[in-house]
Amino acid sequence: DPHTHLVYYDKGIIYSLPVGMLTGSVLLANLGPSIDIRMRAVNSLVGQIDAVSTAYGINSTLLEIDLKISVEMLVISPFLLDPQQIEVKIPLVMQIVQGQIPQLMVGQLA
């Protein structure tokens, strides 16, 4: 990254973390020398489009279209080797579609 010197992209993503971060303790998170942690993608990116329509009022429908993205990463470090799965839901469209009022309803309202 040209703006920071923390991430390098030569062989995967390499990020520098303090050793205290690997203990899992909040109090020790910023202590100790920094070590490099390499992350590599285990699987490719998986995306899925979901469309949901629900009733909204008397003659309207709420239409929601979302993009679900799932990435599985493998964190490689001297102390742990855990696959991490990240899922993100991005709303693409959220729209209310109004239908016509039936003639039966118009006659009763007048």
Image (cartoon, rainbow, N blue to C red):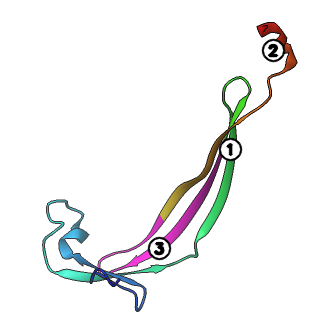
Measured as percent of width and height from the top left, residue 23 is found at 22, 68
The residue pinned by badge 2 equals 105
Judge from the rendering whether residue 59 lies leftward or rightward of residue 92; answer left or right. Answer: right
- In reply to whether residue 68 is colored magenta, the answer given is yes
Image depth: mark 2 or mark 1 in front: 2
Look at 40% across and 87% down and name the residue there: 9
Decide: is 70 above or below 75: above
Look at 69% across and 49% down and name the residue there: 51
Tell me where residue 97 sits by quadrant.
top right
The residue pinned by badge 1 equals 52
Decide: is 8 above or below 63: below
What amino acid does circle 2 point to?
Met
What amino acid does circle 3 point to?
Met
The residue pinned by badge 3 equals 73
Of labels 3 and 2, earlier in sequence is 3
Q: Residues within 10 Å of mark 2 (few under 14, many from 20)?
A: few
